Image (tube, rainbow, N blue to C red):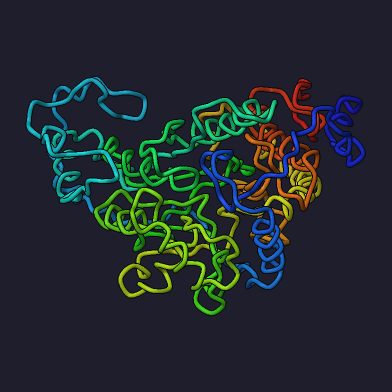
Amino acid sequence: MSGHKGVFKMKLSELSQLQTTPMAKHNGRGKASSFLSDSFLFGGGAMVALLVVWTLWSFFSPSPDPNASFSTTGSEPKSIIAMEDAENVSPQDCAVNARGFNMHYDPPETTFYDDPKLSYTIEKPVKNWDENRKEWLKYHPSFAGAGANSRVLMITGSQSKPCRNPIGDHLLLRFFKNKVDYCRIHGYDIFYNNVLLQPRMFTFWAKIPAVQAAMVAHPEAEWIWWVDSDAAFTDMDFKLPLDRYTNHNLVIHGWPHLIYEEKSWTSINAGVFLIRNCQWSLDFMEVWASMGPQTPNYDEWGKTLKSTFKDKIFPESDDQSGLVYLLLKEREKWGERIYVESEYYFEGYWVEIVDTLDNITHKYVEIEKEVPRLRRRHAEKVAESYGAQWEEHLRDAGYGKGSWRRPFITHFTGCQPCSGAHNEMYSGQSCYDAMQKALNFADNQVLRRFGFVHPNLLDSSSVEPLPFDFPA
């Protein structure tokens, strides 16, 4: 048995082995957060400035509160839906799925879906959404029961055409698998979009029409969670602490002092955000989208944003700058409902994360050696209970930069896996190796419940069976 255990120590020397298929290098442009990564690329200098500033600010940003609580066992977030108004479950609700939803019954009563004026498009604002959602749930009571306030739909996506990078489509598939794994473990639904729902809202702007359409298509979802295609979950156990966001409708990763004091367009990252399915959110996205390329004021907005943010080099209006602008200029209208999350890796810059994964693996293995119940074999369906058990052993780990806790989401900003037009600050090989390492680090957390593990984080194709009671 001891001979088998050595295979799974994942020594640094093993992890330093290089893959033989580099990412294509391109002297094109980069971006801060993307949707269709090779249709609209910023100047290389812009990305250099962004990543340098982002990296430097990560050192000066406030240290996360070591006593911060991210438990999800507290009271459920407040919803716009008054659950007590839902009618008793009808006889038809006997035909429910594993999560208690009746997927086979749509009552004849008229709902907003029967209104010919309803549109899923960004051009036509949706009104009375809170009332319409409430009514729909009234007629579909199986969706209005326990857990309705914490129901999440994740959205991600990529371009409709094949990637220019020869291995781009393979990488996007792996990123998508990573998200599917996370959603399966935590019972979230997921939608992958690879078309422009508004043809003129390209690249990073494409997320807004997709999010709005998802809200209308999924009135049962309390939250819509956008996650960029180049972001990977690297802690499969960590669950969104929705109780922290009870009184908020939009959650973004960033630093308040960089928004309101430094007035920087990189004070947040718009590549990952959580938004409540409510009228406030639709109204906010309508204003946000008004800065986009589908509007006649697009060029003017580009000038306005560039003059507002002194560190913004490129002249185009982008979603991230637009979001920071609304926080700055319309704080009284929107700011109270926007939570700027900086106490854990709601999304984290890959350069500061990937080199810590070996040490994190070692720390977790050492804890498992001492705590038999954490290494006990179990079904994937009860994985969340083991994630909760881990928390008492991670109290001293901290959160965010400098922590030895698994980073929640690792975002490969600037690597451009689909186009291969990576930022000139680093090589395509370094991007590729880092993505392989992070994705396999996450995959090991999944595969372990199937009895296997990648012994080398830079070798995606090789796995070995896990010895019983590993790592005792």
Where does residue 352 sit, x and y in percent of width and height?
Answer: 73, 55
Q: What percent of the width, then of the height, locates residue 387?
A: 58, 43
Looking at the image, the residue that sits furthest to the left is 109
The picture places residue 102, in percent across and down from the top left corner, at: 25, 25
- Is residue 386 in sight in this rendering? no
> Foreground: 440 or 279?
279
Q: Which of the pair 307/360 is nearer the observer?
A: 307
Q: Horizontal placement of 177 versus 186: left or right? A: right
Image quadrant where one finds the N terminus: top right
258 shown above or below 320: below
Total marks shown come to 0
When the figure is inspected, residue 185 is found, relative to residue 80, above or below; the finding is above
Query: Based on the displayed image, in which of its 4 quarters is residue 251 positioned?
Result: bottom left
Q: Return the x and y of residue 265 as percentages of the image width and height.
A: 54, 66
Residue at image point 52% right, 31% down: 180
Task: Determine the residue positioned at 49% across, 58% down.
Answer: 320
Point out the image quarter for the C terminus: top right
* Quadrant in the picture for residue 141: top left
Q: Looking at the image, which residue is at 60% across and 64% down?
A: 313
Decide if residue 37 is on the left or right side of residue 211.
right
Q: Examine the rendering and report whether any part of residue 11 can be seen.
A: yes
Residue at 30% over, 48% down: 277
Left or right? Give the position of 128 relative to 464.
left
Task: Decide: is 425 above or below 322.
Answer: above
Q: Is residue 161 above or below residue 254?
A: above
Q: Quadrant of residue 18?
A: top right
| Extreme residue toward the bottom, this view | 261
Closer to the camera in the image, 355 or 299? 299
